[in-house]
Image: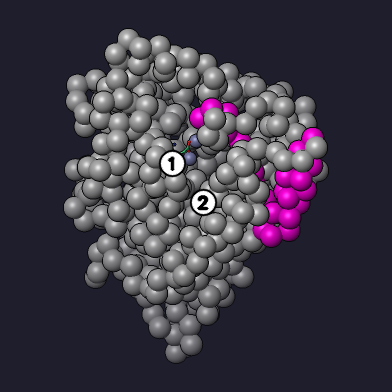
Amino acid sequence: MGTLIKNGTVVNATGSQRADVLIQGEKIAQVAANISNDSHQIVDATNLLVMPGGIDVHTHLDMPFGGTTSADDYTTGTQAAAVGGTTTVIDFSLQNQKSTLQDALETWLKKSDNKACVDFSLHMAVTNLHGKNGEETLHEMEEMVKFGISSFKLFMAYPNVLMINDELMFRVMQKAAKLNGLCLIHAENGSAIDVVVAQMIAEGKTAPHFHALSRSPKAEAEATHRSIALADMAGAAVYIVHLSNEYALDDLKFMQKRGARALAETCTQYLVLSVEDQMPGRSWDEAKFVFTPPLREKRHQAPLWNALNDGSLAVVSTDHCPFRFKDQKELGRNDFTKIPNGGPGIENRLQVLWHFGVNQGRITPEKFVELSCTNPAKIFGMDKQKGSIAPGLDADIMLWDPNANYTITAATQCMATDYNMFEGWTVKGNAAKVFSRGELVVDNTTQPGKFLGKTGRGRFIKREANAGGLA
Ligand code: URP
Ligand code: ZN
Ligand code: ZN
């Protein structure tokens, strides 16, 4: 006996059709019109869209950063993901500059052990190279790929903490090219930004909105261009994370046109929030929106939406890096450089993307699936297991109600922050039911906002090294 989802419209990135979906155990067994009921348990999906569960490839759970630790651990973070329709996350393990990649891997596997509630994987952030010409660490990259970690993150910002210089970055890129891996880049010129930051602090400009003013879109564009050029020289595929503005986009497109193997994501917040609306420089409340890259002027939003449609941006993620307003953002009350950088978003990505994307005619439902699920699976080497509604894949399925009105508020959210970046917004479109590997883990129609599965049921997903799916 299986679970039979009947009367829904199946939406994949490639097209939509009226079809039933049969789940057997953890897998999708059949997708076809009018599958006979037999002795299956029936789930009625009349007026609902049957879509693959979301994949958020950019999260920071239980991560030490900015003098504190991100507020969601693997339990609250993955439960919040599930409630919002996301059934897989890729989190970041960070190499401590003095230690090894293996140490970082062990640390993050411990954080997730018996805690993750949906499936997850890890990127490995390389922050330093050890041994002659970096050989020890570069050799470790081979071990990571064998373990199923095929993407390596390089920070061009946060000097003395996470930033890597061009020489080391280039060596990592050369190694990644040999391994068919993918280099993820936080593209901002951290050294130039730090000069501006020091000058602002010296002038007494300490309020939260100076964080945004200190990090020019041009610093992001410069690093975007430089990293893609270096990757191109090294023969590596790159993926620019959290691309936030039109100038960086122009550089991305320029390099893509030249044939560089470059992909990029943007994040929900850059599509719908702006420095004018959220950070006008009036109050301490604006610390809620201190993340990096910062919010940009509104005029950057339309080019980002267009780039999602023309394919130059391939993914929408969250960069979920939550800190509580009351006791964590407070660390920077008198100095914006001490405000922990990051915002919560894992729970609301799909609602916001649907409401402002599909409802407002900017993207189709198929594009919505492509950006939030299918492309993430392909680019990060797990499309044989996840990312589409198709026989043989994991039964990670979301029944989406395009007519459900939902008011976003921290008062009822699963995320562990005491605020929400979209507080009070009413969106139309929400996950009604969510299945993770065949198990009903969320039913927002009967028990809204509640995770119904067992804590710790999430599994580590080993990913193929496929150079971002780029030939
Ligand atoms: O502000 C952010 N984005 N914090 C998390 C670290 C990063 O740069 O992604
Ligand atoms: Zn970053
Ligand atoms: Zn991030």
- Which amino acid is tagged 1? Phe
Q: Position of residue 292 (x, y in %)?
A: 43, 31
Q: Check mark 1 vs ligand 1: CB closer than 8 Å? yes or no.
A: yes
- Report the residue at 48% width, 19% height from top: 193
In-image side of 457 versus 131 (left or right): left
Nearer the observer: mark 1 or 2; the answer is 1
Which residue is more in the foreground, 286 or 241? 286
Report which quarter residue 463 is drawn in.
bottom right
Q: Residue furthest bottom?
A: 39
Which residue corresponds to mark 2?
A: 91
Secondary structure under tag 2 reads strand
Magenta span: 133-159
Compared with residue 4, is residue 52 higher up or lower down, i.e. above or below? above
- Report the residue at 43% width, 41% height from top: 65
Q: Check mark 2 vs ligand 3: CB closer than 8 Å? yes or no.
A: no
Q: How is the image coloured?
A: one colour
Q: Position of residue 101 (x, y in %)?
A: 65, 50
Q: Is residue 373 visible?
A: no
Is residue 293 one of those drawn in magenta? no
Which residue is more in the foreground, 125 or 313? 125
Q: Is residue 92 visible?
A: yes
* Sequence order check, earlier mark of 1 and 2: 1
Which residue is more in the foreground, 21 or 425? 425
- Report the residue at 53% width, 67% height from top: 459
Label 1 – label 2 distance at C-alpha: 14 Å
- Which amino acid is tagged 2? Asp
Compared with residue 127, is residue 107 higher up or lower down, i.e. above or below? below
Secondary structure under tag 1 reads strand
Q: Position of residue 46 (x, y in %)?
A: 34, 67
Which residue is more in the foreground, 132 or 374? 132
Which residue corresponds to mark 1?
A: 65
